[in-house]
Amino acid sequence: MIEDNMEPPLLGLEGASPPAPEWFTRALAVPFESYSVTVDGAAIDCRAWGERGKPGLVFFHGNAAHLGWWSFLAPLFAADYRVVAFSLSGMGASDRRAAYSTELYIREGLAAAEAGGALLAGPPVMIGHSAGGMPVFGLAARFPDRLRAAIVVDTGLPGPEMTAKPPRHTGRTYPSLSAALDRFRLSPPQPCENIYVADYIARLGVVRQDDGNFAWRFDPRLMEARDLGDSWADLAGAKVPLALIRGERSWLSGGAMEQRMRHTAPAGTPFIAIPEAYHHVMVDQPLALVAALRTLLEAWA
């Protein structure tokens, strides 16, 4: 297990953006629509790429994250799909709530998909990373008519198999953007070679407050005010095509967690390991993840 004493990936850049490869720059240049949808009184921040009327893809991000964890990969599917990414309530530019739950996240995802035109060609494919896999499992088990298939990327579920430490959300603020970026960390801790990805998601995850200080765009109460439900039962009860992707080096989804998931998932569920990827697969091996997703989508099509 990697200890939480690794040097932050953006430390020392003094607020400057590192160079990025051409594919990444091209992806960010793909036009998208920004929109908001209100779910149970909270405004949910959304983006959509591709033409309305094409098959839908809907991306759920992980804990204390935001739509930017997918928005540099979503454009790579826009030629063939209507793609939607959104920030769950309490995270990103979406509103905060008094309490959070998997059930709320499911409703937020369905509302974002409908408002973004991802349902016009029929039920979409739902894709979730980390904690974002839990509402995707819930959709697959309890709302099978609302999605065509489900893909879950490096999700660990509650139980004795979970070895990750709960993240610490202190609500700390910083005097400058550079100071905030210097402190950005991946959680769970892991190496980060593609610092251009880390820089992109960090910049979308910070906001300047009225007092001039900078803070991360998530509710510090997120973990203590959340009901995750029974995701193990949802995994066992999935009624649509389902695939599980993990980072081959991820200690969150490996070992006993992987074995229990293999025994729990419906028979025939593919388990795909991305080489040289840790928990944050889209940060470590973004193009390998895209290739795996495209392969699954083509097979199901």
Image (cartoon, helix red, strand yellow):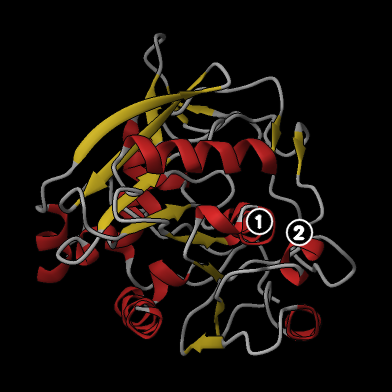
Q: Quick check: 222 above or below 155?
A: above
Give the spatial CA distance, label 1 vs label 2.
6 Å
Q: Nearer the viewer, residue 192 or 128?
A: 128
Residue 65 in percent (x, y) is at 50, 46
Callout 2 environment at 10 Å: few (<14), some (14 to 19), or many (20+)? many
Looking at the image, residue 34 sits to the left or right of residue 201; the answer is left
Disc 1, disc 2: CB below 8 Å? yes
At mark 1, the secondary structure is helix
Residue 210 in percent (x, y) is at 39, 9
Q: Quick check: 189 above or below 52?
A: below
Quarter of the figure with the C terminus: bottom left
- Answer whether residue 21 is visible to the viewer in this image: no
Q: Amino acid at mark 1?
A: Met
- Answer whether residue 89 is visible to the viewer in this image: yes
Q: What number is the disc on residue 231?
A: 2
At 41% from the left edge and 74% from the top edge, which residue is drawn?
A: 284
Looking at the image, residue 51 sits to the left or right of residue 6; the answer is left
Quarter of the figure with the N terminus: bottom right
Q: What number is the disc on residue 134?
A: 1
Q: Name, please, the residue furthest toward the right.
A: 160
